[in-house]
Image (cartoon, rainbow, N blue to C red):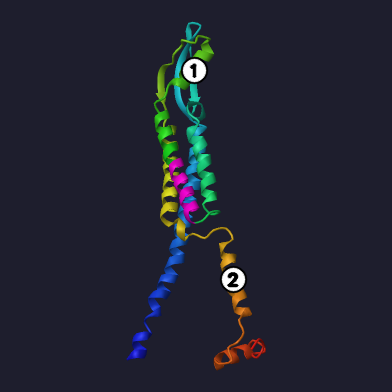
Amino acid sequence: MGYVSAVPVPQPRAARAAVSPGGSRRSLAAALLLGALGATVVLLSSGQIWAEGTASVGGGTVPVEAQGGTVTGVPTALAIVGLAALVAVFAVRRAGRTLVAALLALSGAGAALAAVLGASDRAALDAEAARISGNTAAAVAGLTHTAWPYVAAGGAVLILLAGIVALRFGTSWPAMGGRYERTAGPRTARTARPADPDRPENLWKALDRGEDPTHGA
């Protein structure tokens, strides 16, 4: 009875060991995908036309338009910061990783807010109208906004989600070079430990490895 009850004990541990690396890999892949995709969407959207209108010049009208980067440069800057934080997550550990993951999330939140605010901005078009007409008091007529600011905001939300995933699961992710540091130490310890002459099984293992079991005794 004692032998039968002892057999199932290692099984839950083995199951947890098998599930944990898979879950860690999935969360890691999700954060990388969300962060990289989100930053790409923000950067591409910021180069598109966000606002359009017309300006009066010489008794007529000319079309004016403003790209996202002209309306606000905040989403682009924060997307770059988010990419840097996404890479830095793997170079730090413990509290440092938490701080970098928080920076990643904040970058996404800030970029999303700036993009939404830029969707109703008209200052960039008014400045363009003043430049074209040569009249500093000129204003844009027929102002319209495209959907690109909201596309940029959607990409920023993906960066935010990447930061949230990093905050939640980042402590289980490996750091750069961590795998080699973990495996190097135990191997050194095993080779340096002499066989215990009081334990016959250790003597047989030493002989199988071609070692002298009496060395160091």
For residue 197, above or below residue 104 = below
Residue 3 relative to residue 45: left or right: left
For the stretch drawn in magenta, what is the main secondary structure? helix
- How many marks overall? 2
The disc label shown at residue 108, or none: none
Q: Amino acid at mark 1?
A: Ala
Residue at screen point 45% across, 22% down = 52
Give the residue furthest to the left.
1
Q: Which residue is mark 1?
A: 127
Q: Amino acid at mark 2?
A: Gly
Residues 65 and 173: in front is 173
Which one is closest to the eye, mark 2 or mark 1? 2
Mark 2 vs mark 1, CA separation in Å: 64 Å
Q: Position of residue 24 (x, y in %)?
A: 45, 61
Q: In which quarter of the view is residue 23 placed?
A: bottom left
Q: Which residues are magenta?
A: 94-107
The disc label shown at residue 185, or none: 2
Sort mark 1 into few (<14), some (14-19) or many (20+) by Cα contacts within 10 Å: some
Residue at screen point 44% across, 57% down = 27
